[in-house]
Image (spheres, rainbow, N blue to C red):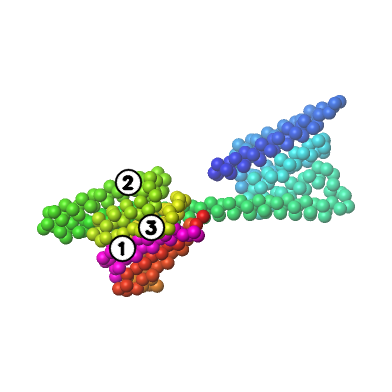
Amino acid sequence: MNIWEARWLRAFHLLYYACLALGLILSFDENTAPDPLTVGILALMAGWHGFFVVRRPHLLGRLNPMAVHLVVICALYVALVVRDRSFDVVIFGLMPQPYLMLARPWSYVGAVATVLSTFAARGHLGEPNAFWQLVGSSGLVVAIGAFVDYVSRQSVQNRMLGVLEERARLAREIHDTLAQGLSGIITQLEAAEQAMPDPHAVQKRVALAKELARENLREARRSVDALRPGPLTDAGLDVALAEAAGRWSRTSGVTATVSVEGTPRPLSGEVGTTLLRAAQEGLSNAAKHARAGRAAITLTYMDDEVTLDVFDDGAGFDPAARSAGYGLAAMRERAGSVGGTLTVESSPGEGTALCLRIPSD
């Protein structure tokens, strides 16, 4: 039971006892007070609910013994109202109890039994139209219960959907930070291994690997703190793109340029993250798969959208071919989460162009 379910449960228990107290207050008038037997029934009704229902939340939803407790409480309610109609108000606290105490479909049966107890307490069962009144009242109570149950199930499904979306977001974040960084470190160490006869080249590759490792560690810590890319916290998107391109150029040995067109404007954190991660993924793919000689990033601010283009002159590929990589799928998921679209244009030997379009807020 989560905190919200516990709060709702507590609220309905308090409503039950508030209705008992209100009935007791209404039973007093200027000349008379409720007789001892009525007070005793009221006390028994309060004690039974407290001892067998409130103190045993782990049993809620079980047909046995909760059905027995509901029958006892309804019987006490009938006896109470028969003695003093002032306690009619108790029904408002009693009516939700079947839905708390019993699971579907028995909760609906319990709700109908509660309605039946009100008719019995008020002496309406012998009236000519009692059957149809009972059917109408029971139908209304069951319909309300079904609606509340539907809303509750939708809430649970929405929470589950939120969990799945958060998992997908974390997967993208891990891929865009840790996986890319570790891939770069491996690339530098493999290059150092191949350059073994040349101490200067080995030292350079190891230094780059260490720089990547430190940067990746900082990014991991930032992601743990806020799951937001670190460069955007202190600088604009154009600066963050320039830093990412410069770092990639140093580790890959390939020139990457960044250009900004249009009038820069503030972007939301999620939009900025999506654009930066797309640029990083495009550069990472160019280094790992494209064997590119140069790469170019263009950030364009337009009136109704912001676009990011990442181009490389590498080997290219067939976008229609099934790929085992996660990068493009993660980029499309990111783009979709902010209302954007990602298009990929490439063919073998013709390089690759990625275009991410995000509508303006």
Distance from disc 3 to disc 1, alpha carbons, whole Å, reads 15 Å
- Mark found first going from the N terminus, 2 or 1: 2
Asked if disc 3 and disc 1 are in contact, CB closer than 8 Å, the reply is no
What label sits on residue 295 in the rendered view? 1
Residue 81 at x, y percent in the picture: 80, 38
Q: Nearer the viewer, residue 344 or 24?
A: 344
Which secondary structure lies at badge 3? strand
Residue 341 at x, y percent in the picture: 46, 63
What label sits on residue 260 in the rendered view? 3
Distance from disc 2 to disc 1, alpha carbons, whole Å, reads 26 Å
**Three-letter amino acid code at disc 3?**
Val
Highlighted range, magenta: 286-315
Seen in the picture, residue 303 relative to 85 is either above or below; the reply is below
Q: Quadrant of residue 314?
A: bottom left
**Three-letter amino acid code at disc 2?**
Arg
Distance from disc 2 to disc 3, alpha carbons, whole Å, reads 27 Å
Residue 262 at x, y percent in the picture: 43, 58
Which residue corresponds to mark 2?
218
Number of other residues with Cα within 10 Å of mark 1, as a class: few under 14, some 14 to 19, many 20 or more: many
- Mark found first going from the N terminus, 2 or 3: 2
Q: Residue at x 70, y 51 (%)?
A: 144
What label sits on residue 330 in the rendered view? none
Comparing marks 2 and 1, which lies closer to the viewer?
Answer: 1
**Three-letter amino acid code at disc 1?**
Ala
> In screen coordinates, is 276 left or right of 63?
left
Number of other residues with Cα within 10 Å of mark 2, as a class: few under 14, some 14 to 19, many 20 or more: few
> In screen coordinates, is 146 left or right of 218?
right
Judged from this view, the residue extending furthest toward the front is 263
Q: Residue at x 66, y 36 (%)?
A: 14
Comparing marks 3 and 1, which lies closer to the viewer?
Answer: 3
Q: Is residue 190 visible?
A: yes
